[in-house]
Image (cartoon, rainbow, N blue to C red):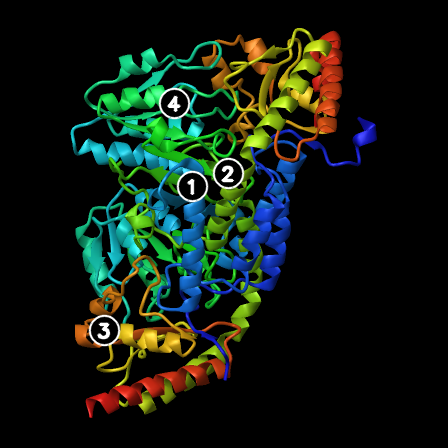
Amino acid sequence: MSACAYLDWNATAPILPEVQAAMASALAHCGNASSVHRWGRAARQAIEEARRDVAALAGAEPDEIIFTSGGSEANHLALRGFAGPVIASAIEHDSVRGARPDAAILPVLADGSADLAALDRMLGSEAPPVLVSLMLANNETGAIQDVAAAARIAHAHGALLHTDAVQAAGKLALDRRALGADLMTLSAHKIGGPQGVGALVASPDLPLAPLIAGGGQERGRRAGTENFAGIVGFGVAARAALSLRAHGPAIVALRDQAARRLCAIAPGAAVFAAGVARLPNTLCIAMPGVPAATQVMALDLAGVMVSAGAACSSGKLRPSPVLAAMGVPEAVADCAIRISLGWSTTAADLDHLVEAWGALYARTRAHAA
Amino acid sequence: MTARANHPPIYLDYQATTPCDPRVVQAMLPWFTEKFGNPGSITHAYGREAAAAVEAARAEIALLIGAEPREIVFTSGATEANNLAVKGAAHFHRALGKDHVVTLATEHKCVLESCRALEREGFRVTYAPVDRAGLVDPAHIAAALDDRTALVSVMLAHNEIGVIQPIAEIAALARGRGALFHTDAAQAVGKVAIDVGAMGIDLMSISGHKLYGPKGIGVLYVRRRPRARITALIDGGGQERGMRSGTLPTPLCVGLGEAARLARLEMGGEAARLLGLRRRLLAGIGVRVPDAVLNGDAERRLPGNLNLSFPGTTAPALMAACPGLALSTGSACTAAEVEPSYVLRALGLEDGLAAASVRIGLGRYTTEEEVDGAVDALAAAARRLARGGVTSAGAGAT
């Protein structure tokens, strides 16, 4: 059994060795990419190479990539940079809700997918231009959204579509053009790149008011000295992501086998969004009657790292708005944990999880008895 | 020049960016690899270990500026910190009937652009002038303040001309009228002593990469007592006590913490050494190019900054003639622009002198030999250009 099983990849992924190597040499380089001297120009070239790699990952053109400090900022740039009204799905990341508290909420169905018939109706009652924000894959349940269909509906109403692809990147093939997404958010640290860097994909013609104004970097759309090492690391991770996606089927097999074993241990266990297409690596499951906080603590003591939803702020555990939006009763949602796998996850890691979870379940039964 | 052709150029652009100190890189590396957790993941050991490292870094930064750790808000850099301070303070205080901001004509682009954005939203902004030495007369600030002033924002040490403004005096004026005081201290932190309490600073921007730390990280200091209230620029997960959402980049936070620790320990000796190098460079130029002009106050400036105009040359021609030197004309952000610096114009410099100015930044790794090499190269190029006329020499620039 592994000493430590890291099963919280949706919170952050370990950095790839090739990313680390590229960043270590980038950190040793001194040069502001906006400086015109030789050191500045070398930094500029490396950034433009990373821009091409990130564009390739997203199915976009290099001049559509705006580097930001991460997914939260990219979501803000997309949604606050847009002047008109916003419709956001009920399962968006906190940074989408935070960016536009005034957004109309698109409901989701019990299976975890956005209600696209409702989207059609809602767009009919909003005056264009409207921006629709629908994430490509949910961070908690892994439910993949039909963004292409949402984009067709949005475009039929003269609206634009933004998709937060932070969790989908590196796990699904991304093709911004095929999806029809006008704006797409990416984060480096979910794909084996560094924390502190992300990107918004947006056509250069799309009007977008900058969130951070100043020196005019990123074509005037995002000011601030470029995070040189971070961007270089993002580029390397983007290139690697194209091949790491090949781990998908093996990860699905590990996940589904673990889910079957967990459900066999606790017959009342519920897997969320099991009826729709999900990210290969994500399992959101409730152990009935055992609060998520108890589960994550017990698992942590046993050396298994999972989470009880999004890893943001909080310092405290709170009921998941995602599960609430799916109509999951609060008593069940309170018992949900998120297990997320990655390319280095082994069968031993999942054995470790199943054993620790089983031990906890047995203890709680013994108490109840 | 050909003798140096195969060497890296002498780096004299420390105000654009500083190399990341190797000790900082060493401190950062483990947080990229085996200790990779999300500091927001409080449910497991990887997350808690990252969170503890972020808190240790926060404490180091606080110590450097006389703040409390809870007053340190991590951002993606000084540009974001300046946007957050200026827009955030204005937006919060709009609800209290305040609609006015005071700043200087010579502030960094990101402060000025933030002010322009506020003007488009209906705020009034006063851009106070500076004198020929680049310094503001506090009387101009006092005259600009009114009861509806939400914020006064004045840079501590200037990025192009290095001058250090009378911050404590201006902060007292702002507080006296019920306005918050913000200072962009990106160039000053770790170079000159700063105590946010003694100086009366409410909000202060810090940059990692101007302090031998990494790019992509900065800080906004936000005073707690009395509390400086601001509206967040990025909402979401609620990190940084709601003032700045987004996953905290642990390695970058750790790097900035280590950079702050090194600055606290080494600042005194380093400043004295740089002052010596600066005087040596200025004296050397003074002897070889007697008509060179120093822009910005001669004494009240960063130890590692000079801004010099070489009459009869233009900055692009001068830089092209010194390929062995990494120099700049001013702010790196706007380096691609051909317009003379708005900063030098605000000092009242004639266009010819403004267009003939270069910024020379000295730092932690600058040696006496490099300073002497820079004097030789600059003096030879300036004299040749002034003698031969600029146009023909400029044609060689590629």
Check chain identity for marks 1 and 2: say if they share one: yes
Q: Quadrant of the C terminus of chain B?
A: top right
Quadrant location of residue B1? top right
Mark 1 to mark 4: distance in Å?
Answer: 20 Å
Q: Residue at x 42, y 41 (%)?
A: B63
Residue beneath label 2, please?
A: B264
Whether tag 1 and tag 2 are in contact, CB under 8 A, the answer is yes
Q: Nearer the viewer, residue B1 or A182?
A: B1
Residue beneath label 4, please?
A: B167
Mark 4 to mark 2: distance in Å?
Answer: 20 Å
**Disc 2 marks which amino acid?**
Arg
**Disc 3 marks which amino acid?**
Ala
**Disc 1 marks which amino acid?**
Leu
Mark 2 to mark 3: distance in Å?
Answer: 49 Å
Mark 1 to mark 3: distance in Å?
Answer: 43 Å
Q: Is residue B317 visible?
A: no
- Judge left or right: residue B259 versus residue A332: right
Q: Residue at x 64, y 22 (%)?
A: B276
- Judge left or right: residue B202 versus residue A50: left
